[in-house]
Image (cartoon, rainbow, N blue to C red):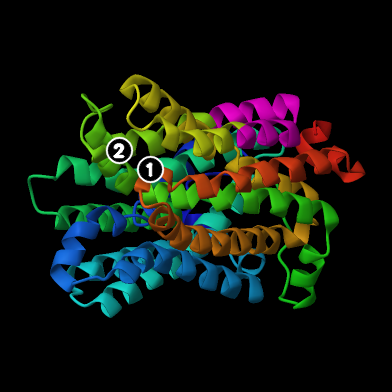
């Protein structure tokens, strides 16, 4: 029956065409992630959000994603049911949960619907990563880079929506992101299929999660991923606040209004993802991810020192940070698909993301606390620098492990 609906023939369709369709869908689906964050002032005015509740506006999505990822991993959904159905169903749930934000007028109700949005998105992103792996054996690094680039553009989209609607109704952000997510699900279910690279479907066994956690090479990849995630989502969540604070001290504002500044800083990461994917397939995953984390960590450390200096230099380092902070993300996913047993790929990806997104909740909460401790938003991102430095060390250790030969067809 599913074959009647699927327009992508695994035998006849180019993997790159499949990648383009799936990427477009992911851009739409991920536009709901920060849709609430970019309208924080309006939601605060409507519902009286307190300082801790403002943090939970974003953290609720992270927590929901972790809860959903644990459920998906526990029941082995990514390895036991058709991926396109799981993704399409989850997109629909995310669109509905996001749309409900329009009618929520209390802090608790707003946080609950953001939590539900995160739960739904856990059925989109990890399965999409596995779906792409079914289309690519070679060039998997660049394919994963394109997918993470799509995630980046989707995450940046609400900043653009808000920038374009500053003088109009802020509810447009919610309507547009919900519609994009719903359409993404419909495209997946009617136009997408799994590719020719087969990953065996299995019934759930609790021991599968234990197998994933006890795999030493995977553990090193996950340490690298945790270091990466320590930095990434806290930067994405608070970059608009940082922009509002720091851009007031310049004679001219790089990229225009703070909302446009945030959009460009986040979205440029999509280019970095593709470049990193291409380079990792040539020079190796461990080496490229380590270099990128060292660069992004250095940017996190230095950006605060550039406030009140040259707006050109500030904008340049901010762009470099946005370019490198997400660029390595796809390579952690690619490494998991290469180091895991074929019947555990979906579970391993979901476990990795559950751990990584769990860490993001800590840093999203800590960044404003850190800023308050130093008495200024100027230093809020110093906290993020240690994460990528530790992650880089883990990936260099993995590079010396014998199993790293499985990465990128022998390129470590």
- 45 relative to 8, above or below: below
Query: Chief secondary structure of the magenta span?
Result: helix
- 356 relative to 304 in the view: left or right: right
At x 42%, y 52%, the residue is 374
Where does residue 115 sit, x and y in percent of width and height? 39, 71
The answer to if 275 sits in the magenta stretch is: yes
> Could one spot residue 399 in this view of the protein?
yes
Res 246 label: 2
Foreground residue among 238 and 165: 238
Res 35 label: none
Q: What segment carries the magenta color?
A: 273-294
At x 46%, y 64%, the residue is 62
Q: Which residue is labeled 1 in the image? A: 378
- 117 relative to 342 in the view: left or right: left
Where does residue 388 sit, x and y in percent of width and height? 62, 43
Q: CA distance from mark 1 to mark 2?
A: 7 Å
């Amino acid at each position: 029956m599913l074959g009647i609906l699927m327009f992508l023939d695994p035998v006849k369709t180019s993997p790159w065409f499949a990648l383009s369709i799936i990427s477009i869908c992911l851009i739409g689906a991920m536009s709901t992630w920060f849709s609430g964050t970019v309208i924080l002032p309006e939601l605060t005015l409507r519902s009286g959000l307190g300082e801790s509740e403002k943090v939970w506006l974003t953290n609720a999505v992270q927590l929901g994603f972790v809860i959903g990822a644990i459920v998906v991993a526990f029941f082995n959904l990514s390895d036991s049911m058709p991926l396109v159905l799981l993704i399409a169903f989850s997109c629909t749930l995310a669109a509905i949960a996001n749309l409900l934000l329009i009618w929520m007028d209390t802090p608790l109700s707003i946080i609950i619907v953001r939590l539900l949005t995160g739960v739904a998105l856990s059925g989109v992103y990890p399965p999409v990563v596995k779906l792409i792996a079914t289309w690519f054996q070679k060039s998997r690094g660049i394919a994963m880079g394109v997918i993470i680039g799509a995630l980046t553009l989707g995450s940046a989209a609400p900043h653009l929506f808000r920038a374009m609607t500053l003088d109009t109704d802020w509810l447009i952000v919610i309507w547009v992101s919900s519609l994009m997510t719903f359409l993404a699900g419909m495209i997946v279910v009617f136009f997408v299929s799994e590719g020719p690279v087969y990953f065996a479907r299995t019934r759930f066994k609790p021991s599968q999660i234990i197998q994933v956690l006890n795999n030493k090479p995977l553990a090193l990849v996950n340490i690298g991923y945790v270091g990466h995630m320590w930095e990434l989502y806290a930067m994405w969540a608070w970059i608009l606040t940082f922009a509002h604070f720091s851009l007031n001290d310049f004679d001219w504002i790089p990229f225009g209004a703070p909302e446009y500044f945030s959009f460009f800083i986040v979205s440029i990461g999509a280019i970095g993802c593709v470049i990193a994917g291409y380079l990792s397939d040539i020079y190796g995953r461990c080496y490229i991810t380590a270099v990128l984390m060292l660069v992004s960590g250095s940017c996190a450390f230095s950006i605060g020192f550039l406030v009140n200096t040259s707006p050109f230099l500030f904008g340049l380092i901010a762009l470099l940070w946005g370019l490198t902070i997400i660029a390595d993300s796809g390579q952690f996913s690619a490494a998991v698909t290469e180091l895991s047993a074929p019947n555990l790929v979906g579970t391993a990806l979901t476990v990795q993301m559950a751990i990584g997104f769990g860490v993001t909740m800590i840093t999203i909460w800590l960044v404003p606390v850190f800023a308050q401790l130093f008495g200024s938003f100027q230093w809020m991102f110093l906290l993020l620098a240690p994460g990528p430095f530790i992650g880089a060390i883990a990936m260099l250790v993995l590079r010396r492990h014998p199993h790293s030969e499985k990465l990128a067809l022998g390129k470590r």
